[in-house]
Image (cartoon, grey):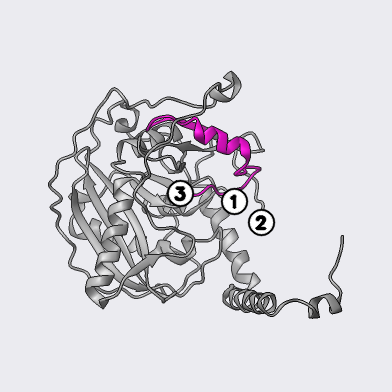
Amino acid sequence: MATATPGACARRSGSDATGSDAQGRAMAAKVATRPPAETLSLWKREQARLKAFVVDRDTEAWQQDPAFSGLQRVGGVDVSFVKGDSVGACASLVVLSYPELEVVYEDCRMVSLTAPYVSGFLAFREVSFMVDAVRRLREKEPHLVPQVLFVDGNGVLHHRGFGVACHLGVLTDLPCIGVAKKLLQVDGLENSTLHKEKIRLLRAGGDSFPLMGGSGTVLGMALRSHDHSTKPLYVSVGHKMSLEAAVRLTHGCCRFRIPEPVRQADIRSRGYIHRTLGIGGTPAPGRERSRKAPRPRAGPEGVSEELAGHISPSPLQSLGSTWPSDRSYRPGPEKLSSPPSCPLWLGETPSREPRVHETERVHPVD
């Protein structure tokens, strides 16, 4: 391996040196805010402990119905940061009617996220505020508690098989679905040429292909969520729901690329920041802003049978949906919240015994 000599470093241009200095300062700032090794070790142990409670199969009758008969309420959670502030944020929970997808409940609160963002540990930064929002809803309007929660993040598609959607599901005991906009490259999953070619073969909304890890486990599905969106979503099981039902419901909740529960939670958290502070909101670190989906491009011709076999057609194409224009909702009254006193232990231990997983989990890679 070739290495740069001190003389070679000294001969770098001024612009290169400036860029290097800026990168060095950014790296130093990142290291300074990273939790100590002892904290990360505690977080890993807590993930492993709670992971034993994850249920990765359908637990409700409506989940097994092709049209989701009996499903009336779907929820979404999101955290948006105050622009230019890595601590001040707005945590939101919204509940929508199904299949109309009208917002019937909204809870937005300004919070302070004191735990730093670390890849693979998003839950320890955000999930306690989501749990608090669900608790308030159960106390004040229990008839509006969602039957399933959509989370902007991963479920079992995760470094240790326990992402934020699993964490929230176990602590609230609600079915949860993880929906990510970018592929988390774990267990051998890569955004490779083959992966991109499979994406190009997703011709219509509802088409999908499995995300098979190197361990032989299907960790999630890449889903084309809308006819007018060429960028897939990465859907994974969070809790108390099968992957097949999670993919079908995600597609059924998409007016645009992003599932409406998550999209509305994002819109309303940003709006709350603007109304409260008079400034804009930004996505939390590790997230990206939802954008209007581009128009689709024509798919490639002459696709091999082997590659085409990875693509599953939409299971919902024959069901149809109607989208009413009424966007009325009932906002929640809360305004402020305090961060939890301890960022390590988020919620009480479930009272039931751990369930044995029906699918093999991804081995840790970090």
Q: Quadrant of residue 21?
A: bottom right
Q: Residue 295: x percent and y percent?
A: 37, 40
Characterize the local packing of mark 2: few (<14), some (14-19) or many (20 or more) Cα atoms within 10 angstroms.
Answer: few
Q: What span is colored magenta in the figure?
A: 182-209
Q: In this view, does 321 lie to the left or right of 15?
A: left
Which labelled disc corresponds to residue 366? 2
Residue contact between numbered discs 2 and 1, judged by CB atoms under 8 Å: yes
From the image, tell me which residue sits under label 3.
181
From the image, tell me which residue sits under label 1.
160
Looking at this view, is 226 or 328 the one in front? 226
Give amino acid for label 3: Lys
**Label 3 or label 2, whichever comes before in sequence order:** 3
Q: In which quarter of the image is the N terminus?
A: bottom right
Q: In this view, does 333 lie to the left or right of 173?
A: left
Q: Is residue 303 above or below residue 231?
A: above
Give amino acid for label 2: Asp
Q: Distance between the residues labelled 3 and 2?
A: 21 Å
